[in-house]
Amino acid sequence: EVLPSTSYVGAISEEVAKETGLSMDTRIFGGGGDNPCSMLGNNAYLLESVGTSGTFSVRARQPIVDGTLHPFVLPDDRFSHPQGPRQPLHCIIDAASAIDYMAERVYGKGRFTYEMLNRVAQRTPAGSRGKVIIPFIHGQRVPYAPQGRLYIKGYAPSKDKKEDLIRAAMEGVAYAMKYGFELLREGMRKQEMVEAKRITITGGGAKGEEASQIRSDVYGKELINPHTEGAAVGAAYIAAAGLLDEPVEKVSARLFERGIQVSPQKPTLIAPRDENIKLYEEGYQRYLEVLEEASKNGFEQESLI
């Protein structure tokens, strides 16, 4: 049976109550997917989520149907937000997983941390000394490339530093995300939607200072990290909305009015660095050229690392 996300669907079992310590009276509501819940929990208009995979999505009144974007619907059947109940979304299969993949080949499995990778990336200049990485580990949805694999351009093992590949991987992920962002922006323009000045970021990839700075530079946009576990907060909003029989937006507004904080930290704003914007605009065009080359080659390449 298909039900609205805010529908009551039952109570927890006695076994679950014993294991968790929750009351047998605890109610269960329908809930939603991770990205729609994250959109609600972060109170975002334009949302970037970077984890194992990476997504870009926007609140919209109408779906953007172009054959490339996922036509998600935000999880509230009594939706009252003026920006609309739809969530067109673009997804890349590999984001942080592509950086992990590269780091394992540079340092070995389990021999690095994300803090370390961000420090390493800071030591490499923007543009990674001409190295370009297409971060397709498990194929790609858009552009459609089921055979897609990691592809490296501009790296000479005999003379170049392996460490440069860490920043190149971060830049490659940023370029792959920008590819989807541009598709989303085109759909937004067709619907005459507002062009956001800032992008709300979430997910494990949002915690990397240099990786996030790279993405800000590549997009030419400010990023704001609310440091909220957005998906969990959004799911809690949905349950509260179902319990109180109110729209999610009213529930979240009520918490805000009462001064209830959903994050222990103040939001962090990341602004693009002027000196890198043009460099990364050129870098993105180079990325597209390498992507075309890789596609023509069937992503076949001798092992460079």
Image: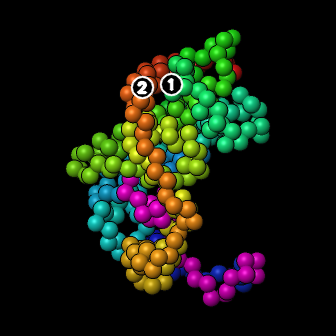
Residue 118 appears left or right of 277: right
Residue 81 falls within the magenta-colored stretch: no
Q: Of residues 64 and 197, which is closer to you in this image?
A: 197
Residue 220 appears left or right of 52: left
Look at the numbered disc 1 and give the secondary structure of its residue.
Answer: loop
Asked if marks 1 and 2 touch (Cβ < 8 Å), the reply is: yes
Residue in the picture at 42% in, 39% down: 272
Identify the mark at residue 279; answer none if there is no mark. Answer: 2
Residue in the picture at 67% in, 43% down: 115
Task: Quadrant for residue 138, please give it.
Answer: top right
Residue 21 falls within the magenta-colored stretch: yes
* Few, some or many residues within 10 Å of mark 1 (<14, 14–19, 20+): some
Quadrant where the C terminus sits is top right
Identify the mark at residue 127; answer none if there is no mark. Answer: 1
Residue 133 appears left or right of 58: right
Q: Position of residue 220 (x, y in %)?
A: 38, 38
Look at the numbered disc 2 and give the secondary structure of its residue.
Answer: helix
Q: Position of residue 133 (x, y in %)?
A: 55, 26
Q: Is residue 188 above or below residue 230?
A: above
CA distance separating discs 1 and 2:
7 Å
Magenta stretch bounds:
18-46
Task: Quadrant for residue 216, please give it.
Answer: top left
Q: Position of residue 153 (x, y in %)?
A: 55, 18
Q: Of residues 88 and 49, which is closer to you in this image?
A: 49
Q: Amino acid at mark 2?
A: Leu
Q: Of residues 277 and 292, which is closer to you in this image?
A: 277
Residue 85 appears left or right of 226: left
Q: Amino acid at mark 1?
A: Gly
Task: Quadrant for residue 180, please give it.
Answer: top left
Which badge, 1 or 2, comes first in the chain's sequence?
1
